[in-house]
Amino acid sequence: MRFFESEDLDPETLVACFSQARGCSRDRAAVDLVESLASRMAGLARALADTDLMALEDHAKRLQATASAAGLTRLQRAARAVAHCAAVKDHVALAATVARCRRLGEATITLLWTAGQEVE
């Protein structure tokens, strides 16, 4: 079993956690988690490009909730930091924390995607 180094979780644990939080099957949870993470991160990127701090804060809070439901504590903390930086208008820290969210989110999506490919 491969472990996701930045969160110390394996794909099965992530999906099981998200499945329980959502009250759905593991297959549905895996798809929902990937879609939710991708959507939230795309929203962050758009809001950052548009310099829309209110939208950034909103997307970060949504990403934080998704990460919390999946047990992704580092991503959850990074998203909370993005929301805080947007709220206090700290543009330098905002760019850094959004980049951290993107790295953690993309790594999680890659982990889930490759785990799904191994099953098929």
Image (cartoon, helix red, strand yellow):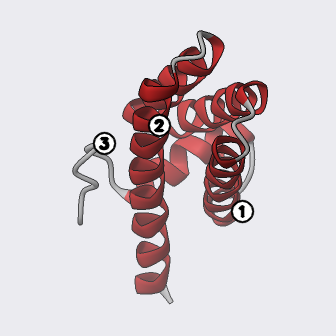
Give the image location of residue 119, x and y in percent: 46, 83
What residue sits right under mark 3 in the picture? 7
The residue lying at 66 percent from left, 48 percent from top is 49
Give the image location of residue 53, x and y in percent: 71, 27
What residue sits right under mark 1 in the picture? 28
Give the image location of residue 100, x and y in percent: 39, 42
Picture layout, residue 118 above or below residue 55: below
The residue lying at 55 percent from left, 30 percent from top is 68
How many other residues sit within 10 Å of disc 1, few (<14), some (14-19) or many (≥20)? Answer: some
How many other residues sit within 10 Å of disc 3, few (<14), some (14-19) or many (≥20)? Answer: some
Q: Residue at the bottom extreme?
A: 120
Label of residue 95 in the image: 2
The three-letter amino acid code for the residue at tag 1 is Arg
Circle 1 SS class: helix
The three-letter amino acid code for the residue at tag 3 is Glu
Q: Give the CA separation, mark 2 to mark 3.
A: 22 Å
The three-letter amino acid code for the residue at tag 2 is Ala
Picture layout, residue 51 above or below residue 32: above
Q: Tell me the quadrant of the picture where the N terminus can be found.
A: bottom left
Circle 2 SS class: helix
